[in-house]
Amino acid sequence: MTTGTRMAYVELGNPNGRTLLFLHGYTDTSRSFYGLIKVLLRMNPNLRLIAPDLRGHGDSSIPNSNTENPFEIANFADDLFSFLQLKNIDIIDLVGHSMGSIIAQEMVSRHSEMINSLTMIGAFVNGKENEAIQNFLMPEVVQKWQRQLQVEFGDNWREKSYSMTPEDLGDKTLAFIKNDWVIEPDCNNDVLEAIYSETLKVPLATWFGAMEALSKIDNEGMMKQVNTPLLVIWGTGDTVTTKKDQDDILEARKNATPNSRTPVEFKAYDISESGNHRPGHNLHWANQKMVANDILKFISK
């Protein structure tokens, strides 16, 4: 691609059908959407469904270490626009989860004419005010892991992070990822194990750079300029993005188009498909039918 990234992706469905582009979250891969895509295809075989591995994730290439931070949100968006150009895709419906929702916001703000609709799952607009990012992910994960590398490698720690993964940080790190990171109530264990295995392969540079970028994001002003049809899906058991994060999104859109008829919908999931727990941050891993149904209803309007 023109950005230099080699992007792996999954594509299923009708190559001439309506195109949905799925953007996974921080340290995930396209596998995050496998189950949802399969359900969507059963419901509507005429759709064209594409899920890429974002730069530094999955089987996509990791950028060179000779730039200050090649994981800024604009970098991810640049990759995706280059990808769409190579695929000769002019119009899409965007579905973004967590970090993917932030990238989707960037894409919509830059080329709204290409976006039919935007669906955001476990989303936020302001990383500066997101409690999980500021009070846990930055100080207790990213910065703690960085200090561990600094002790071992000194000034070369950042460069080393491009060739290292969480597997190099020891058993406590692996236990954290398995028990506290790759989780979702009522999700099939085989799904969690597959995602866990891929999460362990994400380079530490990606963990560091992407979270540093997210911690500086404030898209509230940007979203006030966006008039794209918007569906926001959130689980009431989500501890990464809160109800306040959802309210901030909806308030920004309300201020953007107070008298507009452009659809804006908010779906709060109080109970999982199995009826056992409140859906969490990765709700689409365990509630594919609910999410697929809401997406199809929304884009059909």
Image (cartoon, rainbow, N blue to C red):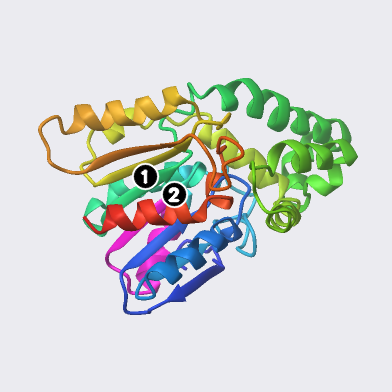
The residue labelled by disc 1 is 106
- The answer to whether 67 appears left or right of 118 in the picture is right
- Quarter assignment of residue 180: top right
Residue 278 on image: x %, y %:
56, 35
Residue 59 on image: x %, y %:
64, 65
Q: Is residue 90 magenta?
A: yes
Please tell me which residue is depicted at 44% across the width and 49% down the height of the picture. Answer: 96
> Which of pointers 1 and 2 lies earlier in the amino acid sequence?
2
Labels 1 and 2 touching (C-beta < 8 A): no
The residue labelled by disc 2 is 96
Q: Amino acid at mark 1?
A: Glu
State which region is magenta: 77-95
Q: Quadrant of the C terminus?
A: bottom left
Q: Is residue 103 above or below residue 94?
A: above
- Could you tell me how far apart the alpha carbons at marks 1 and 2 are, in whole angstroms? 11 Å
Residue 114 on image: x %, y %:
26, 59
